[in-house]
Image: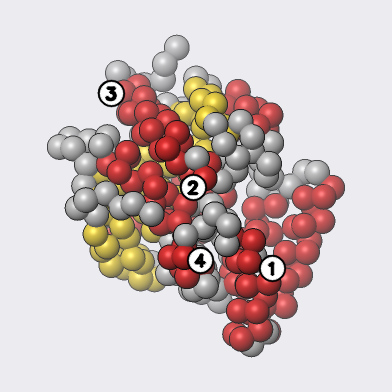
Amino acid sequence: MSVAPGGHLRTVDIPAGRVSVRDIEGPTGAPTVVLIHGWTATADSNFGRCYGALSAHARVLAFDQRGHGSGVRTRRPFRLSDCADDVADVATALGVDRFIPVGYSMGGAIAQLVWRRHAHRVSGLVLCATAAEFGTRPAATARTVGLGGLAALARVTPPPAQRWISGRAYLDRKQGYWEPSAIESATRHDWRMVLEAGAALGTFRSDWWIGRVDVPTAVLIPDEDHIVAPVRQRRLAAAIPGAVAIPTPGNHLAAVTSATTFAPALAAAVAMVNGRVGAGGMAS
C-alpha cells in the first residue's frame, strides 16, 4: 500500500473510546474527506492505494471502524449508526467542522447515515460500491441470519477459536490480492464485532429517506461488482437528487485490485463534489 508523504497517525479520544486516525495533509484551503472503509477491511487495506491521489485534492482522515483492525472495542452490539456518530466525533476531535464522507461498501452505508444524523456537518458525499440496501435477496437474507448466529457464537467463543474462524472463514480467501500487511491488520479484528457488522449491513435500508439528501453527491460504480450489483448502485445514484453516477472499471474490490484506475476516479469525484459545493450547491 502507498501512503502519501506527510501522512501520520494521530491518537484521538472520542466518546466511544480511543481512535488512531491517519491524517494526510492536503493543499492549503482544501476540503477534508473522511474515508470510511468496507466490511472486514481496514482504512489502510481499503484506501491505502488511494491516499496519494486523494491528498492532491483534500486533507485525508481515515480510521478503522468499530471492531475492525485497531478500531474501537465495545461489548455493545455493533450498530452502523454508532459508526456514523464516530465519524462526526473524530472530525470534532480534530477541529474539523464540515467534511466530505467517502464511504466504500459498508462504509457507504455509514456515510449515508452520517448525512442523516449529522447533516449540518456534511458538505458533500462520495459513495463507492454501495447501495441503499444490502439484504433483500433470499441468499443475502440467509447470509445475514448466518452472520448473526456466528456473531452470537463469537460472544462466547474463546479468542483462539475466534482466530481460527477468522482465518478459515475469511482471511484465507484474501491471500491472492491483499498484501501481507493488510492480512496482518485483519488478524487484529474483533471477529464478534465484525460478524455483527455483517449482520447489521444485511438489515440496512436507506431507500425511504435517501431521496432527502441535499448535498452534492457522487456515486462510483465498479462495472464488474460481484457483491453489490451495479444496477443497485445505479438505483442509489438515481434516488439522490442531483447525484452523479461514475462508472469505473473493476470488481467490488476495485480500490485495491484496480487502484490505478479507481484512485484517480475517486480523487476526481472528490474534486467534483467539492467544486459543486464551492459553486453554491447542487448541480442542475
| Residue ID for mark 2 | 256
Q: Distance between the residues labelled 1 and 3?
A: 46 Å
Image height check: is 52 above or below 44? above
For residue 189, say whether it is visible: yes
Which quadrant holds residue 19? Answer: bottom left
Image height check: is 253 above or below 223? below
- The reply to whether callout 4 and callout 2 are in contact (CB within 8 Å) is no
Q: Which of marks 4 and 2 is nearer the N terminus?
A: 4
- The reply to whether callout 3 and callout 4 are in contact (CB within 8 Å) is no
Q: Which residue occupies the foreground of this view, 159 or 149? A: 159
For the residue carrying disc 1, how many other residues have a C-alpha within 10 Å: few (<14), some (14-19), or many (20+)?
few
Q: Which dot marks residue 169?
A: 1
Q: Which dot marks residue 183?
A: 4
Q: Nearer the viewer, mark 1 or mark 3?
A: 1
Type of amino acid at the residue the image marks with label 2: Val
Q: Distance between the residues labelled 1 and 2?
A: 20 Å
- The reply to whether callout 1 and callout 4 are in contact (CB within 8 Å) is no
Q: Which residue lies furthest to the right in this view?
A: 138
| Residue ID for mark 3 | 278
